[in-house]
Amino acid sequence: MKSNKNFPFSAILAQDDFKLCLLLNLIDPTIGGVLATGDKGTGKTTTVRALSDLMGEGFPFVNLPIGATEDRVLGSVNLEALINQKKTIVDIGLLAKANNGFLYIDEINLLNDYLMDVLLDASSSGGYHLEREGISQWLESRFCLVGTMNPEEGELRPQLKDRFGLSVKIATPQELDIRKKIASLRLDFDMNPTEFIGRFQKENEALKQNIIRAKEELSKIEIPEEIRDEAARLTVASNVEGMRADILLLKTSRAYAVLLNEKKVSVAMLHKIAPFVLEHRSEDFTPPTESEDKGNQQDNDKERQREEKTENEGSTSFQLPESVKKGLKFSIQDNIQKTGLKFQMNNNLVKIPYLSKPSNKIDLVKTVKNYISKNKLEVFTKQLSQKTNLNIVFLIDSSASMAIDKQLGFIKGIIKKTIISNPSKKIEYAIVALENSSSRIIQSFTNNNKIIETISSQLRASGKTNLGSAFLKVFELLKSVNKKTVQLFVLTDGKVNAGGDHPFDFAIKSYKTYLSKLKNTTVIDTENGFVKLGRAKLLANKLKVHYIPMGLNL
């Protein structure tokens, strides 16, 4: 069955980076387009056409053939109208037809230099002057330039590469399950395009609405000073000429943040898009994984120090405000619980004795402040029982392959068993959901164990599974809690299909980067059906965490 309908954007696999770059240009057209290099037959043209369909009527998509004449590209006078109607009518060219849409050029490296210079000038200036047979007319031409090419057929001039905002490399997928899935989807589409498109209509519409929202909220995104510093560091380290790359790093990371529905740009977001901006501009560019890991390690070290400060009975890092410290000299022993605390205030030696009750510990700040204000020693304590919290996080794969009701029932069982097993502990719960190729926190930590009863209405079975993004979201959620009290349950079938060229490996790396400090992580295998791939079990083995099939009682 033949059809002029295009393959749905949401159904395209193994093109995550290319799809992301296209979406970022939709959100902020001033980024300046995308250059995609890679193998033939990897769906580059299909992806661009699919995005045009995604945006619907009124969104221009123009395919510029590499053999197009100058008149066809720029425009010309309509000779038939001039001869028969004695009227001068301008037939606008492909550049003007692409206004407010996409201008797509396959094998862009084979386009002649003159036309390339013209369209790049039009792309940067927002239009061009058409000079023909006594007419001079300005034509609007604000478009997103998308070029695809195979480097084996010839390189693009370096100065032209720099004019593309982003660049991405596309390789033929090597994973057997991905190749099988791609072929199966194509067969389904060719047999019944209408039915196939309908299967992805809801997901496409959700993505379209997300893009519209992102365009409206783009100007509200905060770019912290540390992000501007890191962007400058990356361009200097890459020996990039000019300032275009610096500006694009900030623009692109801002568009990425708003696409993820975040309020400000993070270092992780900047590092994610950095290769798209810098790889085609510099041979010295090194992906910022090392600096990202270093930054994360520093965050982890700070968090560990904070936890040790809270838990260390000696509290040798105890600090007071400067106004309180005036005239105060400390001599703090290594273990206050055993030897007590002594300090000198206005030549008076004050001793806080050893506390014999193991259930309490000294509240240093309150004790010292009270002495300073009243000149009277009164020892204040803190109940150690306050430190017996449990923080339970449920990471729910709510992609189309999952049975949400079954997951929710299983989560309720976990909560009930946890409460029964830990009657004296304060327990808080949080939920992170995977959806629309990304993730979001749908419930921050709460001690209301009934919250799960109403949370199902916020879960939507749609989108692809980007587990790497979800692990980053869990890391952000856990910044304010003691990692030693955290139990993470990951409910997934393990069919990770979003997050770079190798999404499964990206998920493993993301967990090891952000969540390696966790001691209690369990993968709950939700895969059902007669034939099982065992991806969730493989995930648990790779992460070296606990594994439980959903049908097994805890």
Image (cartoon, rainbow, N blue to C red):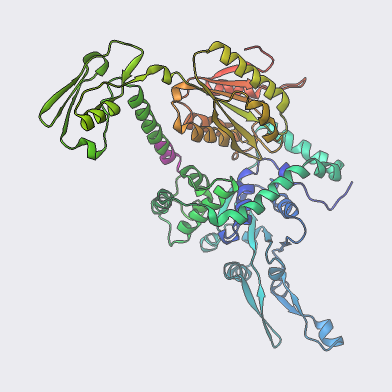
Q: Is residue 297 left or right of residue 208?
A: left
What residue span does the magenta drawing correspond to?
287-294
Q: Residue furthest right?
A: 1
Q: Quadrant of residue 56?
A: bottom right
503 or 23, which is in the foreground? 23
Determine if the magenta segment contains residue 293: yes
Up the image or down, 339 lies above or below 182; here it is above
309 or 446, which is in the foreground? 446
Image quadrant in which the C terminus is located: top right
Residue 48 in view, yes or no: yes
Q: Quadrant of residue 60?
A: bottom right
Report x, y in % for residue 381.
32, 20
Up the image or down, 54 lies above or below 520; here it is below
Name the residue located 49 percent from the left edge and 13 percent from the top edge: 424
Report x, y in % for residue 217.
59, 54
Name the residue located 58 percent from the left edge and 46 percent from the top edge: 261
Q: Quadrant of residue 418?
A: top right
